[in-house]
Amino acid sequence: MSPIDTLVNSAIRPDVRAVASYHVADASGYLKLDAMENPYHLPQHLRTDLAQRLADVALNRYPAASYASIKQRIQQTLGVPAGYDVILGNGSDELISMLCMACAQQDRRAVVVAPTPSFVMYQRSAQFAGMDYVGVPLKADLTLDLPAMLAAIEQHKPALVFLSYPNNPTGNLFAEDDIVAIIRALDGFGLAVVDEAYEPFAQQSFMHRLPEFNNLVLMRTVSKLGLAGIRLGYLSAAPQLLVELDKVRPPYNINVLTQVAAEFALDHVDVLNRQAANLRAARADLMAALAALPGVEVFPSAANFILIRVPDSDDAHLKLLSHKVLIKNVSKMHDVLTNCLRITVSTPEENSAFLDAFAASLAA
Ligand SMILES: *Cc1c(COP(=O)(O)O)cnc(C)c1O
């Protein structure tokens, strides 16, 4: 073995060496419908204003450690209940890893439970923090298996249960009563993390229910709203929990450019909300068009993406690639997703370009 391989094997954990890197497909030249991005830019006049604000930022200074002004904007514009603070993350990906870091134990394996298939970072972050991950399969109709979730909670006493609401990659909202039952079952020992990354498209939220439950943690991001590039997630929960979670947050984790851009965007949140409304309308149109294609099963969606089942997902995916269309083939993620594809909802123009390529891919 070469000296560098010996070094890597000695210094780097075996379970880290064993996993593949988080894969992001190279999208240049493709119609990009694989990552739930908002296809709309900010309008030109706002971009000019934003450029001026960014030009004035003191890049030589660390960010103000309290992040008071951006937090205040979030509290005022995004429905955080009175008396509830937020913690910021470099994307909600960082918040997920902070939650795991804060809950992993040193003398025993703490447990993360989540329905599966769901957002892959729950399992990854649990593993990297040294926690055990227990995935509870969804039912064949992609709804939550509540008895199985409650049994896993009873058996494993998890410190964290992650619930993506709506769920990625399936797109559906789990039943509100089921989520409440899970929050209650964790009472006294575990946190229920409701991940509302797609709230702008679901328009249903547990945010206003924070005061009802000590152990509810509400997590959101501005990524799917149209600001994926600036990397900003936020999390709210009881103040006593936030005090502890904030200790594992890297200081200055939100950079000054992100902070200023986010404040600016939230001052114009009506623009982003209108874009979300357009995407919700486009979602309905795209779902109807997909459902009219022979052999295509369309699952309900409360997100800015649509899950479908086709006769041969690998074949359809490859043919779409040859048409320079990038969607996500999720068919290998889990048995319940056999032959399933996930398509991001985009502008009417991009959606119809996708539909043409997709119809041709199915026919060929
Ligand atoms: C996209 C996504 C995230 C990640 O959001 P970032 O803020 O961009 O890190 C979190 N949770 C779910 C369910 C997602 O789909």
Image (cartoon, rainbow, N blue to C red):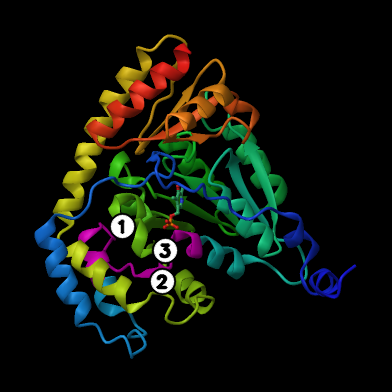
Q: Nearer the viewer, mark 2 or mark 1?
A: 1
Identify which residue is drawn at 23% across, 47% down: 40
- Disc on res. 239: 2
- Disc on res. 12: none
**Residue 61 rendering spot, x and y as whole percentages:** 33, 90
Which residue is farthest right?
1
> Quick one: SS at disc 2?
helix
**Residue 344 rendering spot, x and y as whole percentages:** 38, 37
> Quick one: SS at disc 3?
loop
Mark 3–mark 1 Cα distance, whole angstroms, equals 23 Å
In the rendered structure, which amino acid carries the disc numbered 2? Pro
Which residue is farthest top?
294
Question: Which residue has dot 3 on it?
Answer: 237
**Residue 130 rendering spot, x and y as whole percentages:** 71, 63
Between residues 156 and 112, which one lies in front from this camera angle? 112
Is residue 79 rendered magenta in the image?
A: yes
- Disc on res. 227: 1
**Residue 290 rendering spot, x and y as whole percentages:** 36, 19
> Quick one: SS at disc 1?
helix
Mark 2–mark 1 Cα distance, whole angstroms, equals 27 Å
Magenta stretch, residue numbers: 72-95
